């Protein structure tokens, strides 16, 4: 019995490792890649990621880095890119300065174009190493949501 258990345990480990090494990653649907090509015909260095509930394409266009998200039907959901604090609209700066997070340090900032044509601005606000939030402002400078981040 003492010899059977280690052999059995080893067999289970081998089967588990083999099973995961042969697992297939879902292929990006052609509807998604075609929709991307239509929306961003000049995109270069495109890298796709399967996010399970959607597909994300990281790419470059006009010397800028972008990330676009599509659902499995090829419907565009949003595109975002990192911007500098100086590129924030004045309304968003004022909204941040009036928020309860105004004394937090600003990290990365992303401009997000939504499928309805609206824009949001995601500001990473950092209080300390543990307290960090992603703050989402609309174009008018109103805080529409905040999320804890790591």
Image: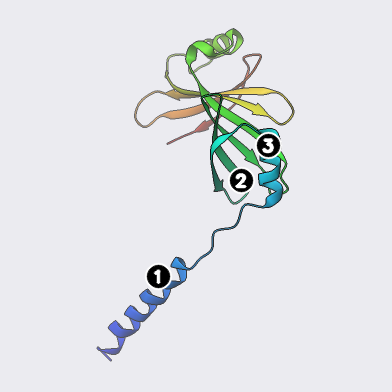
Q: Which residue is mark 1?
A: 17
Crowding at dot 1, Cα within 10 Å, few <14 / some 14-19 / many 20+, comes out as: few
Helix or strand or loop: what does disc 2 sit on? strand
Residue 122 picture quarter: top right
Q: Which mark is residue 55?
A: 2
Crowding at dot 2, Cα within 10 Å, few <14 / some 14-19 / many 20+, comes out as: many
Crowding at dot 3, Cα within 10 Å, few <14 / some 14-19 / many 20+, comes out as: some
Residue visible at 58% across and 29% down in the picture: 80
Residue 69 point in image, percent of width and height? 62, 39
Q: Nearer the viewer, residue 48 or 141?
A: 48
Between the residue at mark 1 and the residue at mark 2, the CA separation in whole angstroms equals 27 Å
Residue visible at 54% across and 47% down in the picture: 49
Residue visible at 71% across and 48% down in the picture: 31
Helix or strand or loop: what does disc 3 sit on? strand
Residue 46 picture quarter: top right
Residue 84 point in image, percent of width and height? 48, 17
Q: Nearer the viewer, residue 88 or 27?
A: 27
Rendered position, 103 above or below 79: above
Q: Is residue 23 left or right of residue 129?
A: right
Residue visible at 53% across and 15% down in the picture: 99
Decide which of tag 2 and tag 3 comes sooner along the chain.
2
Q: The C terminus is located in which quarter? A: top left
Helix or strand or loop: what does disc 1 sit on? helix
Residue 91 point in image, percent of width and height? 61, 9
Decide which of tag 3 and tag 1 comes sooner along the chain.
1
Q: Which residue is mark 3?
A: 77
Q: Nearer the viewer, residue 106 or 1?
A: 106
- Residue that lies at the very extreme toward the left in this rendered image: 2
Q: The N terminus is located in which quarter? A: bottom left
Rendered position, 47 above or below 142: below
Q: Is there a contact, CB below 8 Å, between mark 3 and mark 1?
A: no
Residue 100 point in image, percent of width and height? 50, 17
């Amino acid at each position: 019995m003492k010899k059977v258990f280690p052999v059995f345990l080893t067999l289970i480990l081998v089967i588990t490792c083999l099973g995961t090494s042969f697992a297939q990653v879902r292929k990006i649907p052609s509807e998604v890649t075609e929709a991307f090509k239509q929306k961003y015909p000049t995109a270069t260095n495109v890298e796709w990621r399967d996010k399970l509930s959607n597909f994300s394409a990281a790419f470059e266009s006009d010397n800028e880095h972008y990330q676009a998200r599509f659902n499995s039907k090829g419907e565009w959901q949003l595109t975002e890119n990192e911007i500098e604090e100086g590129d924030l609209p004045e309304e968003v700066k004022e909204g941040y300065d009036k928020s309860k997070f105004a004394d937090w340090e600003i990290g990365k900032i992303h401009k997000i174009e939504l499928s309805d044509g609206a824009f949001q601005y995601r500001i990473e606000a950092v209080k300390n190493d543990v307290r960090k939030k992603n703050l989402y402002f609309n174009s008018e400078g109103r805080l529409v949501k905040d999320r804890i981040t790591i």
